[in-house]
């Protein structure tokens, strides 16, 4: 299986605070990796470094075989292949749902307006929101807005999608509808790296789980291994508080 992501010895320091302390990992094509761990453990910083929203202090990041951390790399071009879904939906309030999804492909000249509109409608059907194409974000529930945000990410045909706690801003009854969409992406073979506090979801969807704490990877393994037979004491302590 082709390697999609490789991270080598990644460090990220903010002033004197070491947010990431020598993180290395890899993800193969079609693999779903879920990152768990206590708040402040470096999970979101790691995700933001993966598409260079944060510039690492040192270390190397490869996505699709291209080193994003190399001098002179065209990061905007490479970033088109990396989708990111945030906790907050970041939709433009003055644009309809359909136009929110069309914006990037048209702006970046990846598609014509007509193609982008067709793609937007196709993606809205995929996330179960065909009837909301002409609605505005404020007319939607949080769960619906997050599904639009996922559709917007898919509009650029990314090779990799990063999810930063995609359900943390949602009411409990809306979490399931977003997780269902992410599950469907996994079944279609999308490569994904997901930071989440939803442990049942992590157990169901992950090919591999990474446990982080204090800027390092404490333990890596399959869901059964991590949840039922954790090796590291820190993993056991963390899971005992949340399961």
Image (tube, helix red, strand yellow):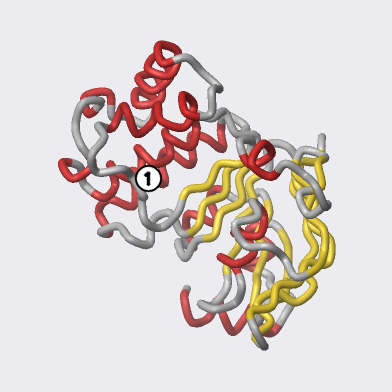
Left or right, 214 with respect to 27, comes to left
Classify residue 7 by image quadrant: bottom right
Residue at position x 72%, y 79% from top? 232
In which quadrant will I find the N terminus? Answer: top right
- Residue positioned 28% across, 29% down in the render: 129
Residue 54 vertical placement versus 32 (above, below): below
| 199, above or below 232, in the image | above
Residue drawn at (36%, 50%), measured in percent from left and top?
Answer: 89
Q: Who's the residue at 73% across and 37% down the image?
A: 29
Q: Residue furthest front?
A: 72
Left-right relation of 93 to 55: left
Q: Extreme left residue here? A: 139
Question: To which residue does mark 1 refer?
Answer: 178
Q: Residue furthest bottom?
A: 16
Image coordinates for residue 53, horizontal then vertical, percent: 59, 57
Residue toward you, 160 or 48: 48
Could you say which is closer to the camera, residue 153 or residue 99?
Answer: 99
Q: Position of residue 179 (x, y in %)?
A: 42, 46
């Amino acid at each position: 299986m082709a390697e999609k992501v490789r991270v080598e010895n990644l460090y990220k320091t903010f002033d004197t605070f070491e947010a990431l302390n020598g993180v290395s990992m890899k993800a193969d094509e079609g693999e779903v990796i879920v990152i768990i761990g206590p708040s402040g453990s470096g999970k979101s910083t790691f995700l933001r470094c993966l598409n260079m929203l944060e510039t690492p202090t040192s270390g190397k990041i490869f996505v699709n075989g291209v080193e994003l951390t190399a001098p002179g790399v065209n990061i905007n071009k490479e970033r088109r292949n990396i989708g990111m879904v945030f906790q907050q939906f970041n939709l433009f309030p003055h644009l309809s749902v359909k136009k929110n999804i069309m914006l990037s492909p048209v702006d970046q000249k990846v598609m014509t307006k007509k193609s982008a509109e067709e793609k937007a409608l196709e993606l809205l059907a995929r996330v179960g929101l065909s009837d909301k194409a002409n609605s505005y974000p404020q007319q939607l529930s949080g769960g619906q807005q997050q599904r639009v945000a996922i559709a917007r990410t898919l509009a650029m045909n990314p090779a990799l999608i990063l999810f930063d706690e995609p359900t943390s801003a949602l009411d409990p009854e809306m979490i399931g509808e977003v997780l269902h969409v992410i599950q469907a992406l996994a079944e279609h073979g999308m490569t994904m790296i997901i930071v989440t506090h939803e442990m049942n979801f992590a157990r169901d969807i992950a090919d591999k789980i990474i446990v982080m704490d204090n800027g390092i990877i404490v333990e890596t393994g399959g869901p059964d291994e991590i949840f039922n037979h954790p090796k590291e004491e820190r993993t056991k302590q963390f899971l005992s508080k949340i399961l």
